[in-house]
Image (cartoon, coloured by chain):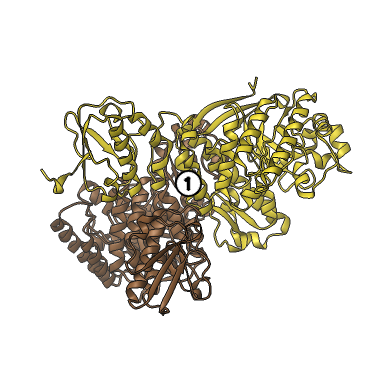
Chain colours: A yellow, B brown
Amino acid sequence: MREQFEVRDYDGAGRIGELQVPRADRTVETPALLPVVNPHVQTVPPKTLETTFGADILITNSYVLHGSADLREPVLKQGIHELLDFSGAIMTDSGSFQLAEYGKIDVDTEEILAFQREIGSDIGTPVDIPTPPDVSREQAAEEQARTQERLELAETVDTGEMLVSAPIQGSTHLDLREQAAREAYGTDLDLFPIGAVVPLMNEYRFADLVDVVAAAKRGLGENAPVHLFGAGHPMMFALAAAVGCDLFDSAAYALYARDGRYLTVRGTEHLEDLDYFPCECPVCREHTPAELESAGKTERHRLLAEHNLSVSFGEMRRIRQAIRRGNLFELVETRARGHPAVLDGYRTLLDYADQLEETDPVSKDAFFYLSEDSARRPAVNRHHDRLERLDVPDELWLTTGSTGDDGWRLVPPFGPVPPALSDVYPLTAELPDRLDEAAYRAAVDGVSVLAEANPDTSMTVAHDGWPETALAELPERVTVRPLGGHREE
Amino acid sequence: MREQFEVRDYDGAGRIGELQVPRADRTVETPALLPVVNPHVQTVPPKTLETTFGADILITNSYVLHGSADLREPVLKQGIHELLDFSGAIMTDSGSFQLAEYGKIDVDTEEILAFQREIGSDIGTPVDIPTPPDVSREQAAEEQARTQERLELAETVDTGEMLVSAPIQGSTHLDLREQAAREAYGTDLDLFPIGAVVPLMNEYRFADLVDVVAAAKRGLGENAPVHLFGAGHPMMFALAAAVGCDLFDSAAYALYARDGRYLTVRGTEHLEDLDYFPCECPVCREHTPAELESAGKTERHRLLAEHNLSVSFGEMRRIRQAIRRGNLFELVETRARGHPAVLDGYRTLLDYADQLEETDPVSKDAFFYLSEDSARRPAVNRHHDRLERLDVPDELWLTTGSTGDDGWRLVPPFGPVPPALSDVYPLTAELPDRLDEAAYRAAVDGVSVLAEANPDTSMTVAHDGWPETALAELPERVTVRPLGGHREE
């Protein structure tokens, strides 16, 4: 089962995958962005999304179509692909969002799935209960149980070739999110949206978002395609991809455009605050902010939406390229310096270094040390784990200088490096000359691991001016010697 | 004098300026990128640079034209603007680069300036001596003296309306760079290229580059437009702009393209390593790397050069926008996470916080705390300086919690914040929830400054779990109290 999703490459928990969408006869490469198309108002026509922006898949709302006086009949007659004029895969949402907004909707899971199938949707969605963040555990548990019932009900509906998504709820209760994910994965449904996280994203609570996604991932199998429902801002795509999200959808490109807001990978700008367009896209190359300000409303909205789409799709390509090259962590580090909230998200991501390490490739192209946070990356963890299992001589000389015949190199943030591993990732890391204390501390941790695993080995650390505060963490039995001008010999 | 350059906005030592180029009847807004145009081989025609990429100014080599069998007569006849078909400002280099490469050229300053004027150059350049990095002090001093002689000779040449640049040499000897700058600024020449730094940039020695530029800046007046000669890679534009460079030139866009190299703000990629184009520009949106690989050589070079130009000009717009909004440091922080060498450059830049503070605006839009390096920004320095001059009560309660009637807030990385400054930049900073130790240490430094300036004030620091290592740096007479669950009262 679950042959419809195959992972091609990993980097941390981020991955490039292929999602087979049989009804559309399409393979969608992930991470993928699904532009949200409002059936009634199309700021950018779906055809343009496909031909200009390269969208393979979009998402629209079947609940709106189901209840639309003017579109219900046309979509039933023509089908959703013809109605929208889009030949790629089309996913349909169920009205859960409206349920969350207005408290009540007038369809149920069986009816909406039947409707979705009838209009030719390629990926359908049951009516789950979107439990907001920060509710009581009782409410979250009760609503999650009801969502699970609906998923199990969805399993019984004849949906033909249409894939069906299985939203994961549980609010900000991490154990519930994990349980919800495990139960959803236990159905035969196909795709796993992480639901009701829009409030977290709107409030820039990216640390909480990472916690929630990481919890859901623990409950899912590796072959589960994960959709971050409502994840619309390119500033957090890389972070979300690194924790293992495969599908994103963006209504932001259009909603923000109508509000004069301009997306960047470092946050949101208001058009009126821009004197220059900080972007390479055709809109930004061919126009100035002043020109857009003075353009007609429709034109301005369209151009802003096109920019917002360019940067969103551009970031997806950057993420895919980073995963392929094995430098997704470096990309997330860069993004973490766009906004303090993304930094919180990144620092939280690194709390899950063990979890990320499970799928992190042993070998990549290069490790760039880019801040004190780099010292907490999974590759550092893995090296420390490996140190526990290495054979060491009775006397070991660990040095930042020349190793001689039987010494080992000492490399921040990894620590001791046996000669055999010297030319192997991540020990070929590119380091700044000006290291922070975190790098030395992590290296000292590595020495401590090695010392603990080899209580009979006599160890000397020979260093070129490492900070005393880091060296102070070494086990007492490790001898410390300054090198060079400070050599004590 | 020196009315041709006017600074409009500062951010740190970075600035937006207007350079009047009278002979071209143009005002060039800075920071500006001058694409290097090879008179013989034009990967992208100058007309396209102007109309598609918005280039206001370019640079070409008058020495090549002077010695060219086929172009010397045409350029003398038509003038450089018509020869290149470019209506913006044109700067001409003198052959100093060839002097550095081949040890000898066959023109002198008087002859080349006369030729530059004759062909209609808008900004000319004397023949300076480009002293490479790391040479002996003697050599650097002797060659700098000869460069200065040539600048003084250039002063005597009748160059009409043509602006004339005054290159600053001195190798990696910072006192010589400063002296060279002071002497160059003492002439009546117009524009100040920092010369012979290409080897530093080629070797990613961005820390040394910052040292060199900062030294030159100390010798120049604020109204001196500074050109970073040969600064071609967008990964370091923001860093160089932050230390006060106004003009950049890029041969890289074309040279790299011919070598299959693809520029990004986070470094260089080789076309063959790209599976996806990590960029929003028209070339990257309309093509895949595989398509470019299989295109004809000329087409591939042109498209790569166009991408390289897009990202270079895009980064210039980002830098200008950042200066205007007062978040250039934030942009440099982001760039520092693209490559460890840029991180070294940024950490070195912060060594000059006092120097940068001289022109840094007191008020800006927002301060984003983005890494432990943020704790060393000029705004933190300035607040600490300000603390020395504040009136404080006899008993002062500094707290991370509620201040009550007469307490002061305690805000990392700034330290004590008197109520009157609470809503004032930078004390409205956006901080991550997960602060690093550097933020607390800087705040503790602030408390220490205040305690030292007010030896008779009794101070209490009430904190919510600050790290012991930071608190340990407080003067002994400051009382420390944990807040909340740990309250000792």
Identify the chain of the residue marked 1, using the numbered disc in the image.
A
Q: Position of residue B343 (x, y in %)?
A: 37, 50
> Residue A418, relative to residue A465: is it above or below?
above
Report the side of A320 relative to A475 (left or right): right
Quarter of the image with the C terminus of chain A in it: top left
User: Considering the numbered disc 1 on the image, is that residue within a helix, a strand or a loop?
Assistant: helix
Give the residue pinned by disc 1: A347
Q: Residues within 10 Å of mark 1 (few under 14, many from 20)?
A: many
Q: Position of residue B36 (x, y in %)?
A: 39, 51
Residue sitting at x 62%, y 42%: A173
Looking at the picture, how far across and down is residue B325, in whole percent? 51, 64
The residue under label 1 is which amino acid type? Arg
**Can residue A322 be spotted in the picture?**
yes
Q: Is residue B201 left or right of residue B104?
A: right
Residue at the front extreme of this rendering: B489
Image position of B16 with respect to B469: above or below: below
